[in-house]
Image: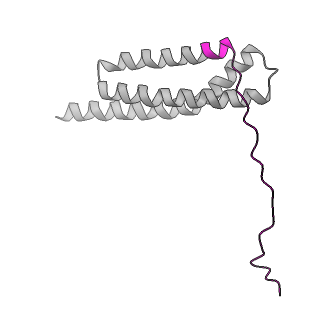
Amino acid sequence: MYDIYNPPPAPVAWNPPQAERLFYTRGDLTCLATLCVSLFAASILVWRSEPTVAFITALGGSLVILESWFTALGFMHRRRSLSVKARWTIFVAALVPWLVGLGIAATLMLGLFYVSDWFS
């Protein structure tokens, strides 16, 4: 008797893919350094008004930049024949959703601090 709703498991040979090394160029590292320096510069500017928000934004932002950078490197690993302009565009495109989200979150937190200071 064969149960169509609970079939026996099919034997599937699973071989994990071989680990591949990510290749990055000097321009890729320059992009990472530029993004990190601009994030830390923005955090230093905000530090005067609210140090906690500046620290949390710098910490979260650096994690986002690293995640986006490695995601972009993984994408470009599959398409090695990209120009320098295309590589920078991919890095920025990987960051745009995070930048918008973190920018809105930081703005809302600062707005909350300003409103609470104004009413107290």
Q: How many marks?
A: 0
Q: Residue furthest bottom?
A: 1
Q: Position of residue 45 (x, y in %)?
A: 37, 16
Residue at 37% x, 16% y: name it: 44
Q: Position of residue 21 (x, y in %)?
A: 71, 28
Q: Is residue 104 left or right of residue 80?
A: left
Residue at 28% x, 32% y: name it: 113
Q: Residue 69 sits in which quadrant?
A: top right
80 or 102, which is in the foreground?
80
Write down the region rendered in magenta: 1-30
Coloring scheme of the render? one colour
Q: Residue furthest left?
A: 120
Q: Is residue 60 left or right of residue 17?
A: left
Residue at 36% x, 26% y: name it: 55
Q: What secondary structure is the stretch in magenta mostly built from?
A: loop
98 or 20, which is in the foreground?
20
Residue 30 position (above or below residue 7): above
Residue 41 position (above or below residue 7): above
29 or 85, which is in the foreground?
29
Q: Quadrant of the N terminus?
A: bottom right
Q: Quadrant of the C terminus?
A: top left
Q: Position of residue 48 (x, y in %)?
A: 29, 18
Q: Is residue 108 left or right of residue 71?
A: left
Residue at 45% x, 31% y: name it: 60
Q: Position of residue 49 (x, y in %)?
A: 29, 21
Q: Would you say residue 3 sits in the magenta stretch? A: yes
Q: Would you say residue 16 sits in the magenta stretch? A: yes
